[in-house]
Image (tube, rainbow, N blue to C red):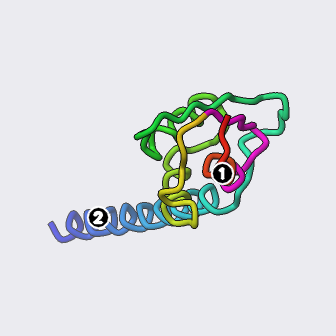
Amino acid sequence: MKNKKIIIEALVMVCAIVAIIGGFFFAQNFGYMAYANEPAGEDDAHTLELVIEAGDSVMSIGEKLEEEGIILSKNAFWFRSKFSEYDGLMKAGTYTVKETMGIDDILAVITQSEAR
């Protein structure tokens, strides 16, 4: 009985350590995606005519960008926009964005005062 308890405690400890290490790597990767301003790719010809309607949420804009391969993570896009100087400044309009632009570059474009 005592051996069984020791084995269970050891398994719980191993699971806790694995969860902590996994959480660390997840947080590190997410933080990197949100703040490194790395582009999703290197194909300068891969562009998107992004249409932002009045009332579109940051997450819905991020979903459009992620679906088209312009950004890697809609969640990182949302996080970066919410905790930057661009929060609440996105404007309705049509914008050209590229796969070679980082999140900050895209935010700078879609918060400019003159959309097409």
Quadrant of the snapshot with the N terminus: bottom left
- According to the image, label 2 marks what residue? 7
- Check disc 2 and report its element: helix, strand or loop: helix
- Check disc 1 and report its element: helix, strand or loop: loop
Query: What residue do we see at 85% from left, 34% from top?
Result: 44
| Magenta segment boundaries in residue numbering | 94-106
- According to the image, label 1 marks what residue? 112
Give x and y (percent) for residue 27.
51, 63
* Residue 64 position by quadrant: top right
Say which amino acid is labelled 2: Ile
Eye-nearest disc, 1 or 2: 1
User: Closer to the camera, 23 or 68?
Assistant: 68
Q: Is residue 17 left or right of residue 91?
A: left
Of callouts 1 and 2, which one flags the residue occurring earlier in the amino acid sequence? 2
Q: Is residue 27 above or below residue 97?
A: below
Dot 1, how many residues are within 10 Å of its Cα: few (below 14), some (14-19), or many (20+)? some
